[in-house]
């Protein structure tokens, strides 16, 4: 039975950073609506919403993908010196 997690500590850090970047991208994408539904707002076509925010979201998904695929470093084993060998006579 193995008592370790599927991912290492670094993987979880990258995963959380990726999720934060995705959330930031969706926040950048939000807004631009009009208070009056009969009036069209051209604010929805701002470069922040149609260019920057999708790139930020895709970057976040890339980070999440990398966090999942990144192989954690194997745990270091304590250095054990080999037993001295007996000389053959």
Image (spheres, grey):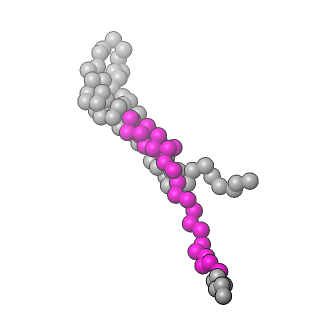
**Which quarter of the image is occupied by the C terminus?**
bottom right
Quarter-of-image position of residue 36: top left
- Percent position of residue 73, x then y: 52, 58
Residue at the outermost top position? 38
Quarter-of-image position of residue 86: bottom right
Q: Is residue 60 above or below residue 12?
A: above
The front one of 4 and 78 is 78
Q: Is residue 47 above or below residue 75?
A: above
The front one of 2 and 49 is 2
The front one of 72 and 50 is 72
Range of magenta residues: 57-83
49 sits to left or right of 75: left
72 sits to left or right of 50: right
Q: Residue at x 30, y 23 (%)?
A: 44
Q: Is residue 80 above or below residue 46?
A: below
- Percent position of residue 18, x then y: 44, 44
Residue 20 can be seen, yes or no: no
- Percent position of residue 78, x then y: 60, 72
Residue 14 can be seen, yes or no: yes
Residue at the outermost right position? 1
Q: Residue at x 43, y 37 (%)?
A: 61
- Percent position of residue 46, x then y: 26, 27
Residue at the outermost bottom position? 89
83 sits to left or right of 22: right
The front one of 36 and 12 is 12
Asked whether 82 falls inside the magenta stretch, the response is: yes
Q: Residue at x 41, y 39 (%)?
A: 62
Q: Residue at x 57, y 50 (%)?
A: 7
How many numbered marks are there? 0
């Amino acid at each position: 039975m193995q008592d370790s997690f599927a991912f290492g500590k670094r993987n979880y850090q990258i995963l959380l950073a990726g999720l934060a970047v995705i959330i930031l991208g969706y926040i950048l994408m939000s807004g631009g609506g009009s208070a009056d539904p009969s009036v069209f707002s051209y604010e929805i076509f701002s470069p922040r919403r149609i260019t920057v925010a999708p790139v930020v979201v895709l970057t976040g998904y890339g980070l999440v993908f990398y966090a999942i695929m990144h192989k954690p470093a194997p745990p270091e084993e304590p250095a054990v010196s080999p037993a001295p060998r007996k000389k053959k006579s």
